[in-house]
Amino acid sequence: MHLSGTLGSVWNVLKTLKPVDVIDIALLSFIIFKLIKIIRETRAGQLAKGIVFLLIAYFTCAVFKLKTMEFLLTVILNNGFIAILIMFQPEMRRTLERVGRTSVSKFSFLSEHTEDYVTKWANAIDVICESCEELSATKTGALFVLERKTRLGNEIYSGTIVDSKPSKELFGTIFYPKTPLHDGAVIMRDGMIHAAACYLPKPEREELINKRLGTRHRAAIGMSENSDAVIVVVSEETGTISVAVDGKIFRNFTPKSLGVFLNDLMINDKSEENQNRKKGFLQIFRRDKQ
C-alpha cells in the first residue's frame, strides 16, 4: 500500500506538469550540472561534500530525535552561508569570472578570432619560443603574461607601458638582469608587448605550493588563479620552461612543445577537438602539487 501510494502521488504530480515546468526543471538541472562541473576540482568541491554531510547528519538527528545535535546543526546551517561567503570568496569570484567569460562568447560571432588577431599572436608565440630557448640556455629568469579575456589593468598599471611589437632582441634586453625593467613580468595584449616590470598577485594559498618553486613560479600561479591569462616562466636557477594556467603549473617544456601549447591556448582554443588535444598534451608534463 505504501509503494502504491507513493507511485500515485508521483503520477498526480506528473499529470499537473506543464511544458513551462519541464523547461524550468531542465534549466535548473543544467545550471546545477554546470556548477558541479566548475567547482569539482576546487576547494569549493570539498565544501560541497561537507555541506551534503551536514545535511545528512541533520536529517538523521531529526529522524532519531537527537534534539541537542539537531539544534547545533540547525545553528551551523543557518549561519553557514555567511561563513562560506567569507572563506571561499576567491573561489566564488573565479567562478563568476568564468561564467562571465563564457556566457556570451560561446554563442556570439564576436568571439571569433580575426585574421589580424591570429597573425599577431602567431608571430608573438614564435618570438616567445625563440626567446625562451635563449633565456633558458643562459639561465636568465623571465616571466611572460599572455592576456586573454580577463583584462589585466591593475597589473599593467603597476609596470611600465611599452606598446611594442615583440622581438627576441627586445625580450633579451628587458629580461637582462642589469636593466631597470627585468624585475617583473611582461604583459602581452593582442600579440603585442603592452607593459613590462609588472607586479603579479600572490597565490591564494602560498603555503601549499611546492617549496622548490621560486618567486617567479609563485607569481605565475597567483596570476593564473586570478585570471584566465597564460603565464610562461623561465627559471633563473635551472633554465626550465614552465607554463601556469588555471591555477596549475606545468613544467619541462621545450621551445617546440611550448609553441604547440601556446597556439592551442591562444589561437585554437575554441573547438572541442583542440580542448581534448590540449588535455592529452598536458599529460606528458608533470603537474606540481599545490
Image (cartoon, rainbow, N blue to C red):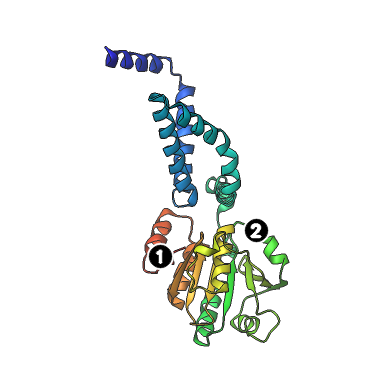
Q: Which residue was labeled with disc 2?
A: 151
Q: Crowdedness of circle 1 by 10 Å Cα count: few (<14), some, many (20+)?
A: few
| Residue 19 vs residue 81, the one in the foreground | 81
Left or right of 184? Residue 58 is: left
Q: Position of residue 116 (x, y in %)?
A: 60, 64
Q: Position of residue 253 (x, y in %)?
A: 44, 74
Task: Find the distance from the CA under tag 2 to the CA under tag 1.
Answer: 25 Å
Q: Residue at x 26, y 11 (%)?
A: 1
Q: Amino acid at mark 2?
A: Arg
Q: Which residue is mark 1?
A: 282
The structure residue drawn at horizontal position 36% and vertical position 18%, both measured from the top left corner, is: 10
Quarter of the view holding residue 163: bottom right
Q: Which image quadrant for residue 66?
A: top left
First in sequence: mark 2 vs mark 1: 2
Q: Amino acid at mark 1?
A: Leu
Count of numbered circles in the view = 2
Helix, strand or loop under label 2:
loop
Above or below, 73 against 208 in this view is above
Q: Secondary structure at mark 1?
A: helix
Q: Mark 2, residues whose alpha carbon is within 10 Å: few (<14), some, or many (≥20)? A: few
Residue displayed at 39% across by 57% down: 276
Q: Nearer the viewer, residue 129 or 116?
A: 129
Considering every residue shown, the one lying at the far front of the view is: 68
Residue 278: percent from the left, percent from the top?
42, 62
